[in-house]
Image (cartoon, grey):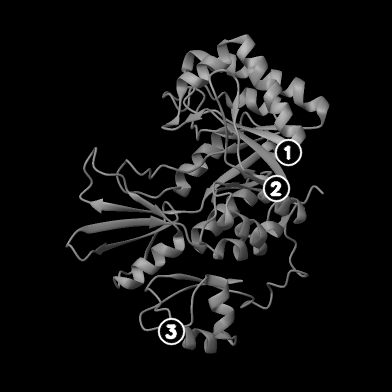
Amino acid sequence: MYIHVVQNGETLVALANHYKMTILQIVAANGLSVSDTLAIGQALVIPQANPLANHHLISRPSKEVNAYLINLGSAGQSMTELVGNDLTYLSPFSYKVNRDGSLKGLNDFQVLNIARSKKVSPLMSIANIDDKGFNSEIAHVILTNASVQEIFVNNLLSVLTTKGYRGLNIDFEYVPSEDGERYNHFLLRLVKRLHPQGYSVSSALAPKLSSTQKGLLYKAHDYSIHGQLLDFVILMTYEWGWAGGPPMAIAPLNMVRRVLDYAITVIPKHKIMLGIALYARDWTLPFVEGAPFARTFSPQYAIQLAARYNAPIQYDLLSQSSFFRYTDELGRRHEVWFEDARSIQAKFTLVKDYNLRGISYWVLPTAFPQVWFVQEDNFNVIKLG
C-alpha cells in the first residue's frame, strides 16, 4: 500500500496509468466513483503500489481491534457484514443503566448474529446515559446504593448470558470525583462476579495526561486501578476538537502521544487499546462560544465538500491531521478537520511503537473505506473464535 497526495491537475486516469493499475482499483480503495473530482491535497490509498508490500514478505504484528457501533439497523448490519473480518470485537453502543439498576436494552439480535458469523466477539457496552447524554447522578446512585448496584450487576449477567456477549465494556463518564474510590471498588466487584463466569471486563477511559488531572471527565478515572483490575482498557483519545469548542484536530497526534506517555507508566502496554476517531467536523467561522455546535459527518463526506468547493486540503504536521477551509453559498466561512489515510497511519505507527494491545474505533457505521486498507497493511487481526 502507498498513500498518494493529490496534486493540482491530477486525475484518476493519470494516477491509474502512473501506478499501473485500473481506475476501479483506486476507486474501490477510496470509496470514490469514476466520475469524482479529486481535491488538491486529498490522500489516496494506492493498494499494492509498492511491490514490497506483499503480506507474505512483511511481518505484521497481531493486534486486537474493537469498534463501537451506534446504528444497529440496516446500516449497522451492512457495516458489520462488510468489515467483520477486520475486527476482533464489536461493541453495540450502548445498554443504559437506570437509577433503579434496570437496563434499557438494545435491539442487537441481528448485529450479534452477523458478528458471530464473522468470528467477531461481541462486547456488551454499558453507559450511564439518559436521553440528554452522560449523567453524573446515575453513576452516583449506582456507585453509592448497594441494593441498586446488586440489581444492576445481576441484570448485566442476565444480558451477557442470554445474548451471548463475550465480555463487558463499562463506559461510565462524568463520574463525580467524590465517587472515584467507589468506582474502583465497583470494578473489583464486577471482575469478581464476571471472571468466574468466563466474561472479560474492560473500561473506556478519558484521555488523561497525569494522575492529578482535574475536571469531572477525568478525576474519577483511576488509570492505575483500571490497569490492575481489568482485562484491558480503551483510551478515548479523541474529542480535543469537540463540537462545542473551537476548530482543531479531533485527535491530534501530539496530544494522543502525551496520553500514552502517561498511560504506559501505570497500565501494562498489553492492556491498552488506542481509541481512534472515524469522523470529521465542520465549524462555522468565526467561532463563537455558545454558538450552534459544529456538524459531525464522515471523512468521506469531508473530502466531497473539499472537492465541491475547490478547497485545497492541508495536512498539519504537529497534529498529523487534515483540514481545509471553504466559503459556502451564503458567504459563511467554514473550517473542517478530519481523519484520512495519513492520520490513521500515524496512529497505527504509535500502536506499533508503543507495542499496545490494539485499537478501538469510535464509531461505526462510517464512510471511511481507507481505514480498512491501512489497517490490513499494518496489522493481523486477532480472532478469539
Label 2 sits on a secondary structure element that is helix
Residue at mark 1 to residue at mark 3: CA–CA distance: 49 Å
**Residue at (46% x, 46% y) in the render:** 254
From the viewer's perspective, tell me whether residue 375 is left or right of residue 290. right
* Residue assigned mark 2: 112
Percent of width and height locating residue 196: 82, 25
Check disc 1 and give the amino acid type: Lys
Residue at mark 2 to residue at mark 3: CA–CA distance: 41 Å
Of residues 104 and 21, the one drawn nearer to the viewer in this rendering = 104
Percent of width and height locating residue 311: 30, 69
**Sequence-first tag of 2 and 3:** 3
Instruction: Classify mark 2: residues with Cα within 10 Å, few (<14), some (14-19) or many (20+).
Output: many
Residue at mark 2 to residue at mark 1: CA–CA distance: 8 Å
* Residue assigned mark 3: 11
Instruction: Classify mark 1: residues with Cα within 10 Å, few (<14), some (14-19) or many (20+).
Output: some
From the viewer's perspective, tell me whether residue 132 is left or right of residue 289. right
Whether residue 377 is situated above or below residue 172 in the rendered picture: below
Percent of width and height locating residue 185: 64, 15
